[in-house]
Amino acid sequence: MTEQVAEKRIILEMGTGNDLYGGDYTKAAIRAVHDALHHSSIVLFKSLGYDHTIMRVQVTIGVQEPDQVDTDRVAAELPRGRAVVSAVFGGLNVRDEEQDTTHVVATAAVEAYLPIDAAHWRLIERN
């Protein structure tokens, strides 16, 4: 029997993005993902010899109208790993009645998971 290696979350980044005049939830979502990605530099792949294609990237987008997000377009923005994108209720709509405009604010949580075999790692206690 082969022991299954558990996935462990190795990264969690958050970002925000908006579309101020077009009311485009996908555009706001993509900008939120870009914001989150610009907070990270994942050097462990090169440093430890991991292939980035084994990484699963879970993206959760929060907007007021989740059904208006094209999750495939958002997934296409991820430069590494196998992306899974979901849209949920969240974010913020800011209505400008005078301009008859809705400003869309999206939030993104980007989580990266790797299969980690705990048997290959050990912690060293330091005094």
Image (cartoon, rainbow, N blue to C red):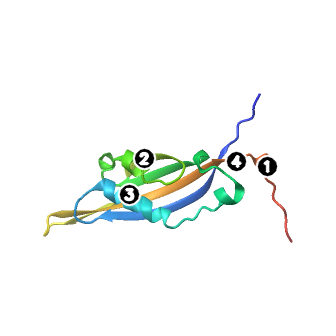
Position in image of residue 68 (x %, y %): 29, 48
The amino acid on which the numbered mark 2 sits, given as a three-letter code, is: Ser
Of labels 3 and 1, earlier in sequence is 3
Position in image of residue 66 (x %, y %): 34, 49
Residue at the image position 37 percent from the left and 49 percent from the top: 73
Image position of 126 with respect to 86: above or below: below
Image position of 113 with respect to 31: above or below: above
The amino acid on which the numbered mark 3 sits, given as a three-letter code, is: Ile
For disc 3, the marked residue is 30
The amino acid on which the numbered mark 1 sits, given as a three-letter code, is: His
The residue tagged with tag 4: helix, strand or loop? loop
Distance in Å between CA atoms under marks 3 and 1:
36 Å
Q: Cβ–Cβ below 8 Å for labels 4 and 1?
A: yes
Q: Nearer the viewer, mark 2 or mark 1?
A: 1
The amino acid on which the numbered mark 4 sits, given as a three-letter code, is: Ile
Which of 72 and 101 lies nearest the eye of the viewer? 72
Position in image of residue 86 (x %, y %): 42, 46
Distance in Å between CA atoms under marks 4 and 1:
8 Å
Q: Nearer the viewer, mark 2 or mark 4?
A: 4
Of labels 2 and 1, earlier in sequence is 2
For disc 1, the marked residue is 120
> Dot 1, crowdedness within 10 Å: few (<14), some or many (≥20)?
few
Of labels 2 and 4, earlier in sequence is 2
For disc 4, the marked residue is 116
For disc 2, the marked residue is 86
Image quadrant in which you'd find residue 30: bottom left
The residue tagged with tag 3: helix, strand or loop? helix
Distance in Å between CA atoms under marks 2 and 3:
12 Å
Q: Give the left or right position of residue 62, taking residue 120 as reference.
A: left
Q: Cβ–Cβ below 8 Å for labels 2 and 1?
A: no
- Classify the position of the N terminus by image quarter: top right
Position in image of residue 92 (x %, y %): 32, 61
